[in-house]
Image (cartoon, grey):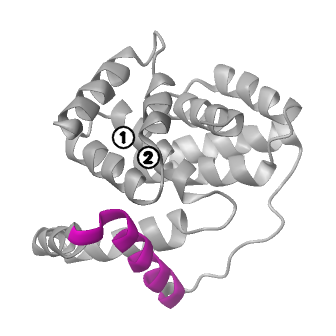
Amino acid sequence: MTQQQHLILNITISMSCNDKSNARKLMQDALDSHIPFAALYEALLQIHLFSGYPASIEGLSLLHEVYNEAPASIEEYDIQLFKQRGEKLCRDIYTTVFEKMNKRMHSFSPELSEWMIIDGYGKTLSRAGLDIQTRELINICILSLGQWKQQVISHIRGALHVGVEMEDIEAAIECLHTKQTNEAYAFAHTMLKEFRS
């Protein structure tokens, strides 16, 4: 795992735990290490999917303070584009189980099934500025904080499908090895073990 990925993961974990003090310190480290504003912006924008809007709002506000920078432009809201690229990315991640997963979700919530493709994968995870490999490592860590078993296993599998090495998944999980997130760390290790079996 790169230094950039390591810092991004730790920042998103801190903001998902509402630890702004640690996030600020890590953002300063990121600035000193010349990690692009755009990469952190995308990572913090992304966490609203699993940590909620407050985590993204507070994180992006803090990023603006530390970097004294703002995004250059806003992506045009294009539902057809979001749907097209969202389905493509979702298929890349879920591969052979995409149809089954989507059909199951549609059976209990057609709205959520559509929102997952349009908002989750199309509008958010397919954006430029941050590679999908880093995005999937973030997903694994943030989902582990909530101990969402099936989702963590799905995103471990998905990370491998988009080219993440197993050693990078293990390194990402190590980012959860802190006093504040030890339960998530233990949970993620259990999920990894279950996935391997």
Looking at the picture, how far across and down is residue 106, in whole percent?
A: 17, 75
Residues at discs 2 and 1 in contact (Cβ within 8 Å): yes
Residue under the image location 40 percent in, 41 percent down = 140
Asked if residue 52 can be seen in this view, the reply is: no
Q: Which residues are magenta?
A: 80-96
* Majority secondary structure in the magenta region: helix
As drawn, 71 above or below 164:
below
- Residue 20 has which mark? none
Q: Secondary structure at mark 1?
A: helix
As drawn, 15 above or below 40:
above
Instruction: Judge left or right: residue 42 versus residue 116.
Output: right
Asked if residue 3 can be seen in this view, the reply is: yes
Amino acid type indicated by mark 2: Asn
Residue under the image location 54 percent in, 58 percent down = 132
Amino acid type indicated by mark 1: Leu
From the image, which quarter does the C terminus lie in? top left
